[in-house]
Image (cartoon, helix red, strand yellow):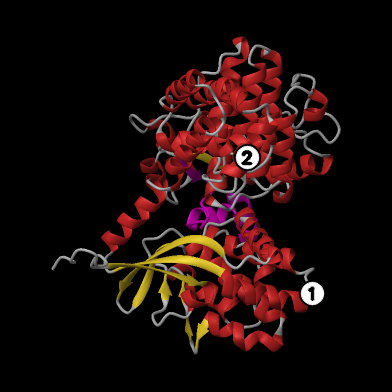
Amino acid sequence: MAAGFGDIPLGLSSQILNLAGVLTRKLPLKVPRYQRPYTWTEREVRQLIEDLRRAYKRGSVFYFIGQIVLVKNDGRLEISDGQQRLATLTMIMAYVRDRLPGRAKQFQTLIMDGDNPRLLLREDDAGFYRGYVQEPGQMKAMARHVETGIDSKDLLANAARTIETELRDIDDRELDSFMSYVARACTVNVVDADERGCAQTVFNTLNMRGSPLSGADLIKSDLIENSKLSNTEADAAARKWEQIENMFERADFAHFLHMMPFLLTGERLLSPGDLATFRGAVDRAGGVRTFLFDHLPRYAQALRAIFAGSIDVGAASAEVNRRVRLMKQVERWDWAPCAIAFLAEHSGEHERVRRFFQALDRFTFACELSVVDDRLQEGRYARAVKNTGDDKMLYGHKGALELTDNEQMKFIDMLNKSRRRDRSRRLLLMRLEAAMPNGSILQMTSDATVEHILPKAGGAAWDMLFADKAMRAEAANLLGNLTLLTEAQNTACGAKGYAEKRKIFFNTPNAPIHALTRDLVGIEDWTMRAIEERHERLVRILCEDWGLIRDSSSQAA
């Protein structure tokens, strides 16, 4: 039966609740198995804590963290959107519970309803989360948990370490007051749906049709209508804006505007509709006319070249576009404002562009692979944006894009260690493939999977060749033991012996043979020595391409 005029739509409701109200609802919250696992890194966890701390110190009546979408199913509320925030906030609460025994009972009631968890993660992670977060006294152990090789569990443990680092210097009294503020003032718009399909529609609408587009419209209106432009200038500005907007997909244009204050001043825009920050950046960078008729068009052209892989810098074009295409595979595009700013100013200086993009490529992957302290990354990117014309500020001592001696050593050390996390391992192999002679430039969407030549789980024949179990496990995850195959090839290889695998590598019809696999042609037997020699060779290729090390045959700038 349809709802009447003026009634709330059947099967859907919405209400504003604080964190305590969300966690203490009558039905427990559950992450369904079809949802992705916990994915937040140190950066997202730290940003949430910093934002909450700023709101607390300002004495804000509330701090709004957005919407969560829930669907009723089998006596529980499935989380269609909001898992990362709720899981992280619960961990923050668990840290405070363990540190303040006198307040443990009050905070634990928000974590557990008697013997039942108020938040249930996916089945693969629920036990881990229950044992370390929801059971009292285990957060310190979680923060020191050894790497498991399972991304979701390792990220949960990393989140516990970040929480401890960010909150340990706050005295107990203030910490109690802060956590009470979070429970009371951290505010959420809770959307309840009776069906998954309805919840998905709400989720898509909130995330695809909402703030990015309206934020772009608000910015356009403010700049053109409230800047004392003449009618002729306003008409010209509107036409220019529309021409630029039509160069991109709507979501891409919204993201482009979102990064604009960072491009202009190094200041981060907190939300797509943050007009005050946006307008302030425009004013400090020369004003509305300069922005509309100079900055916006030039930066848009640079971004378009980045998207299209068509950066034209003469003889350096192929190298620069290769590096950009690979940087586009990292999860966060923090590098993009630097690339846009440099191209907008210096695209005609071909050798400078080549040097800049080698440094930016190196720094981007150093950030992605956690070589550079996450807390320093944004500031260094901001310095690079501000100093695109000053090579000393970019590459000199303490230059924005120059790795410190410790970072360089850490980077090389990281390359020499086993790679256990699936995404970073695959990303690094793709980056290595592109650096090899006649290598392919792959994307995360390519049919290219990581093959462990010595299988991670071993096998009867492999266990005889590599009898030491610990050494076998370590060797299996070294770069020297890895290559890239199609998914079908990978499945066919299984735990077969090396001779059988070689037939699959080189004789599978219609399957590409990447440079990483061609590198195996001359290796007849797969031994520990073969792995180590190949590993050393592959690491050197990466280091030389990034300019991490130089020898007489490498003249990287």
Q: Which residues are magenta?
A: 448-476
Question: Residue extending furthest right?
Answer: 397
Q: Quadrant of residue 161?
A: bottom right
- Residue at point 41%, 78% (across, down): 28
Q: Nearer the viewer, residue 337 or 484?
A: 337
Category of crowding for the residue at label 2, using alpha-carbon neighbours closer than 10 angstroms: few (below 14), some (14–19), many (at least 20):
some
Above or below 352: residue 174:
below
Mark 1 to mark 2 CA distance (whole Å):
54 Å
Q: Is residue 537 visible?
A: no
> Mark 2: which amino acid?
Ala
Identify the secondary structure beneath mark 1.
loop
Residue 530: numbered disc: 2
Which of pointers 1 and 2 lies earlier in the amino acid sequence?
1
Q: Which residue is mark 1?
A: 171
Q: Is residue 254 above or below residue 295?
A: below
**Position of the N terminus by quadrant:** bottom left
Q: Residues at badges 1 and 2 in contact (C-beta under 8 Å)?
A: no
User: Magenta span has 9?
Assistant: no
Could you tell me the amino acid type at mark 1?
Asp
In this rendering, which labeled residue sits more in front, label 1 or label 2? Answer: 1
